[in-house]
Structures are given as structure tokens and as C-alpha cells.
Image: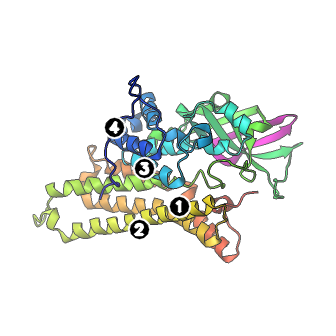
Amino acid sequence: MSLPHIPDVPDVQNAATGRVVDPLTAEEILVRAKQAAPRLRERAEEIERIRRLPSDVVEMLRTTGVFRMALPRSRGGPELDAVQQTEVIEALAHGDASAAWCAMIGMDTPIYAGYLDEDVARGLFTDPDAITAGAIMPMGRAERVPGGFRVSGHWHFGSGITHSTWVVGGVLVTRDGEPEPGPRGTSEHWRIVVAPVTAFEIMDTWHSTGLAGSGSHDYRAENLFVPEEHTFSFAEQRPGGVAPGPDAVLRNMPGVPLGVARAALDHVRELVPTRRDRPTGTPWSESYRVHMTVAEAEMDLSAARYAVYGSLRDQGRILRHGGTATPDQRAATVLARVGAFRTARSVVARLFDLMATAAVYRPSPLDRWLRDLNTMCQHVIAQDQVVQSVGAQLLGGTPHNPYSVGIVG
């Protein structure tokens, strides 16, 4: 059961010039992502070894159109919705998890632009394929000064920062050294600053067991001046901005674990005709144990996938009509996201065990896929605090991670 099939098509070309035409539709971008996946698979060991995406791999991703997915139609973009974005990320993850992770992070530029003044956004992000990296959680401080902020901080997990143009960093705002209240009256004012990658010091910290090729290094700045118009709060989205809602940068994240787990299942199913149980000589195609493992993995992954896409479709329908999701509707999207990460890891762990010692040798990608999933499941978005926050929101309690359930101030 592979990814939903879309026929391969040649790159869309201008008949007069022969030049490749920029991808303008969701279908074109998805087709290109599916075409890129086998090439990403071929480069996966290299990507892991050098701990970043090679420049030609970045260009490969750029030509798919993934970095412009959320660019609004008003600026000539394809404006893919969350379902379409997730499908593209899932297709790329079928090739390589690190590349898909970087694509998922890097395509957030138009979403951030939706929180800036429109003229400012157009001035900053002149390239429709601009790549942004960085961490939005407030690991820095921004002292208010005339015209903007003096920013200092040390941020972790700058995925894709080695090939990005722009960097974001979450900060807490201070005035005369004291915390400034948030725009909605909260005790803290969380903002996100946007600055060129050259304004930050990138630290060589990403020596990880999984997602090694994502280049998710730490980065820091000291006393960096950032104009106020180059900062934003998730509590203050510009009317008409693309992908409304503070969770917009989270919606397509499940595409990465879903794509990796799908790749692992496809890989094991391709091996079944060549395998026999050693003690009995039973072909795997006739093995009850193998039948159960593969079928249960398919069952669990399918349920997780349908939960993700079903909840995203419901959410999109509400947003398109200007509605507000109920707590139960918000819960469905968040829990499906967590479930995708956890289910994918469980599926690949079971397949790894099924393959036994064959899974530990270099030719097998299962070890890398399992390490990639173990690492991405350490992301806060897959942690218990998010599940607790959903429960608290449903039951009138206090969420431990308010942002994960759409609460910002």
C-alpha cells in the first residue's frame, strides 16, 4: 500500500523557450515531490553523513515548489492548504526524513509573512522560494528601544539553517529590563523576530542520532537590533494573511512521520518474497507472524493517516467559512498530529524487530528510519504535555503547553 498514486509527468515546460515553468498548482508540486523522492532516497546516506542538505539537494527541493507552497495567490503563489501541504511533505519523507523535515520548516516563510505588514512582507520576502529556519519558542530576550528591539538569545533546533536565507527566533519582550505584558493582557509578551541568517552565529551543535541531515544547529545573537516591523506576535495576524491561526506552522508536520512509516512498510513488503523463517523454512508470504505484523502495521498507520487528513479537512472547511473551531474540533487536529508521530515510530519499530538482524546492517534503511523517528518524536509537538493540554482544554483545566492548543497572548 504505497502513497496514493499520481502519474509521473515531465517537468512542466514553456513550449517556446523549453525552460522549466515554476510550479503553480498543488498537483504540479505533489508530482514533483513524488519524482524527487527516489533521488532523495539515493542521497540519504550522504545527507546523514554530512549533517546537512547538500546544495544541489536544496535546489532539487526548490524546483519541486515546496518552499512556495503557502505563498498566497495574491502574490502569484499556489496557496496550498494544510491537506495539500501535508501530502507534499509526506511524499518527500518517503525519500528522506531530513530533507522532508527541512522542507516542512523552510516553507513557513509565507505563513510568517501573514503576520507582518503586507508592504514589509513584500519587501523582505522578494523570492517566492525564500527559505526560513529557526525556533519560534521564546528562547531570547528583546529589549524595547526606539524603533524596535535589541535582541539577545541562544536558540536550539534551527533546522535547515545551513541553507536558509531568513531566520526567526522567539523572544520575550522587556521594557527597561522588566517583562512587558502581552497584547491580550498576558503577563509575558511573546514575539517572533525575523532577520537575515547572516545576523546570527550558527553553532555546530547538531551531532544527533536521527534527522542528522536536518542541520538543526543552535544559533545565537547578541544585542541585535531588529526593527519592530520585522517582528510579530501570533496573537496579531494581519487580516487576509494566508493560513489563519497560530497553529498554521504545525499543521503539515505529520507528513514527515507518515511518509517515513509508509516507506518502511513498502520496503518490508518488497522484501517478503525473498524471506523465509529460519527455524521452519516457512516463506514469509505464508508466515502467520509476518502476516499479523504487516497487517497490524498497515491498520495502525492507515488509522493515523486518516485521522490527520480528516481533521485537517474539517479544520480547513471551518476556516474557509470564517468559523471558529470548537474545543473538540481543535482537539481532533492536535491529537491526530501527536498520534501520527507516535504511531509511525511504533510501526517502524515493529518492522525493525520483524527483520531482526537484517535490519542492523548498512544496506537496510530501517535503522536510519527508526533513528529518525525516535528523534522527531522528541520534538515537543509529540510529547505528553501536548496531550495533557488537549485534555485540560476539553475539561476546563490549565494546559501545560497553551500554544499547542492554539492559545497565545
Residue situated furthest right in the rendering: 176
SS label for mark 4: helix
Q: Earlier in the sequence, mark 4 or mark 1?
A: 4
User: Number of marks in the image?
Assistant: 4
Q: Nearer the viewer, mark 2 or mark 1?
A: 1
Q: Quick one: quadrant of the N terminus? A: bottom left
Find residue 119 and report its image quarter. top right
Q: Mark 1 is on which residue type?
A: Leu
Task: Indicate the quadrant where residue 325 lies.
Answer: bottom right
Measured in 3D between alpha carbons, the distance from the residue under mark 4 to the one under mark 3, in whole angstroms, is 18 Å
Q: Which mark is residue 19?
A: none
Given contact means CB atoms under 8 Å apart, are the residues at marks 2 and 4 in contact?
no
Looking at the picture, does residue 256 appear above or below residue 197?
Answer: below
Point out residue 104 in the picture as x, y percentages from the top left corner.
Answer: 51, 45
**Mark toward the start of the polypeptide (4 vs 3):** 4
Q: Which mark is residue 303?
A: 2
Range drawn in magenta: 134-155
Tag 3 residue = 372
**Residue 149 within the magenta-colored segment of the rendering:** yes
